[in-house]
Image (cartoon, grey):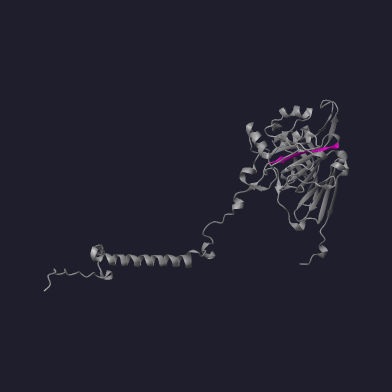
Amino acid sequence: MSDSPPKEPQEPIAPLAESSPTTTRAWFKGLTEPRHRGRLILLSSIVLVVIGASLAAYQRYFASEPAPAAVTEGLLPTVTVAEAETRPSSLDGTSVSPELADQRPLAVMIENHPDARPQAGLSEAGAVWEAMVEGGITRFMALYAPRSASKIGPVRSARTQYLHWAAGYKALYAHAGGSQGALALIPTLSGIVDLPHTAAYFHREPQPGIASEHTLFTSTSELYDFAKEKGASLTADFGEIRFSQDGALADRPASASVSVDFSTDSYKVDWTYDREKNHYTRSLAGSPHVDKVSGDQLTAKNIVVLVVERSFNPNTNQGKGEWTYVTEGAGKVYIFHEGIMSQGTWKKERKDTLLKLYYEHGEEIPLVAGATWYEVIPPDREAFLTHSETAVDTSTEPSA
């Protein structure tokens, strides 16, 4: 006989499927006892293997597959990000971010002497005004709002007519000095904020053989910083300019051109219509007029030729004399856009109100969204304004 103590009888573990809630708890409790530890480890391993295999199968056959279109369509509203995040610019009608749509315009005086060419920043302007000053030389006032320009210039002096047009936009007006009449006018115009050239926001870029007066530059960011320093509002407040979108290609002429002869050949402007792009490209003095920064030829969606009376006063501007323009009231206007010429009337009630354009029957003329160039000529130069237009030849097009 053996001296070893008799083994205690082991209770069988009831199958889980046949257990009541009470016996199920007893079954799991039994697994925690030391004598059943091996079974617990084995069971845990089986559970982990099953879970791992299930996850792998899911990742392979289901998770990487996109949901069928039939299931996803109509569950959530469709949102176009580009439409939700853009608005028409109050200055040129183009679609821009909401914070730029109503940004107050900068009006910057830029010269057009041959030594100042090519100018910097004109390609980013939403509107440009061009008119003669002394000696038949033209000068620009470029307006910026939705698009920035890293370099603008050469910046030049103010003249009274440009101040009247800038006041209509309630613009931030940047210039380098001015005529006697212009400098006296600036403090009387409540619609503008004066941004005269200072070392902090303008800089010189000397060039061999070029006079210092042709070397002053700035940028939109510097000028807006200047305006902030002066406590000026940066929100546009000049009323509404009517805009339209590009018309159908089939309605556009095959070709068109506009020539504005201000004085001499050095200041003759030619605009050539591009039917596919629905804009005009600019040439000056017989050559493409390009931007100094980008090298791109200047373009415009609209060419607005204003016929404006002017007179010369020899006793102002410290004896040098000065041309003054009749900027209030009404006058003749020619509108060129989408290859077509229209005639009408320009109206400006006061110095501080926006100039408006009207058809001959009285309806306001909408501008095509994009850059507009205002070419201002006196009545004696109207005869030198030329326009040509060629219709599309439909005889070669296939019949429907």
Locate residue 148: give its quadrant.
top right
Residue at far left of view: 1
The answer to whether residue 236 is magenta is: no
One can see residue 307 in this view:
no
Looking at the picture, how far across and down is residue 50, in whole percent?
Answer: 38, 67
Looking at the picture, how far across and down is residue 186, in whole percent?
Answer: 73, 29
* 109 vs 72, nearest the viewer: 109
Q: Main secondary structure of the magenta part?
A: strand
Locate residue 6: give its quadrant.
bottom left
Residue at far bottom of view: 1
Residue 288 as seen in the image, left or right of residue 50:
right
**Above or below for 291 versus 162:** below
One can see residue 287 in this view:
yes
Looking at the picture, how far across and down is residue 272, in whole percent?
Answer: 81, 51
Residue 27 as seen in the image, left or right of residue 328:
left
- Callout count: 0
- Rendered-image quadrant of the N terminus: bottom left
**Above or below for 88 versus 165:** below
Residue 285 as seen in the image, left or right of residue 55:
right
Q: Residue at x 60, y 49 (%)?
A: 85
* 274 vs 310, nearest the viewer: 274
The residue stretch that appears in magenta: 136-144
Looking at the picture, how far across and down is residue 226, in whole percent?
Answer: 66, 34
- Rendered-image quadrant of the C terminus: bottom right
**Above or below for 384 versus 181:** below
The answer to whether residue 139 is magenta is: yes
